[in-house]
Amino acid sequence: MATNNSKDRRATTFDFAAALSPTLYWDASFIINIAHEHGRWHKECLAFGVRLTQNDALSYVSTLALDEAWFNLLQMMIEDEHGIKSFWRVVNDHPEIIANYIDRLESMSNDIYNSPQVRVVSVGARTPRRALKNMREFFLLPRDALHLATMRQYKVKHIVTTDVDFAAIPDISIYTCNPTLLAR
């Protein structure tokens, strides 16, 4: 189901059952929800990820998205296992603890790299300048502005995300399971 908010000059949103675009960009929120079993939309994102692997759509994942996903997943896994202790306290007191989670991060990354429908791409040298323009134009936080700039670098207009901040971009479409985005 598509929602076009052209009056508001906002992104067009599609639910995960919609017809697929031939090219898609994954942001970190989608990767995190696939990889973390306690993610808010784990089940939905995992099912959509399976759908993407069974389809001809080509997905782009930037090294930026992997970096962001690794950090967030590391934080989530450490907090899951250490309960009330904060991530920073655990990591600062015992930096070697990171070694306990590298295999899981590597496995998730290998799944992405080994998928024939996924291209892992780099952030170009000029992309940060475009990101600053995106921050100014759409009031995006730096990481989201870099994701948008990377999408534009590779001429991809469709993003898979659960992040509502991308709704402000009028010339993209969003594939999501986030009801807040779908209600717009």
Image (cartoon, rainbow, N blue to C red):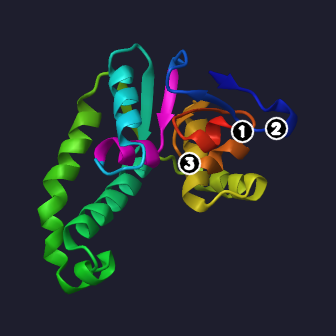
The first of marks 3 and 2 along the sequence is 2
Residue 167 in the image, given as x and y percentages of width and height: 68, 43
Residue 175 occupies quadrant = top right
> Is the Cβ of the residue at disc 3 closer than 8 Å to that at disc 2?
no
Residue at point 87% right, 34% down? 7
Residue nearest the viewer, comparing 84 with 56: 84
Residue 36 part of the magenta segment: no
Residue nearest the viewer, comparing 175 with 184: 184
The three-letter amino acid code for the residue at tag 3 is Asp
Which residues lie in the magenta part? 23-35
The three-letter amino acid code for the residue at tag 2 is Arg
- Residue 181 in view in this figure: yes
Residue denoted by label 3: 163
Q: Which mark is residue 9?
A: 2
Residue denoted by label 1: 184
Characterize the magenta stretch by its predominant secondary structure. Answer: helix
165 relative to 170, above or below? below
Residue at point 72% right, 54% down? 133
Marks 2 and 1, how far apart at CA: 11 Å
74 relative to 96, above or below? above
Residue 144 in the image, given as x and y percentages of width and height: 58, 53
Give the total number of marks visible in the rendering.
3
Residue at point 54% right, 41% down? 178
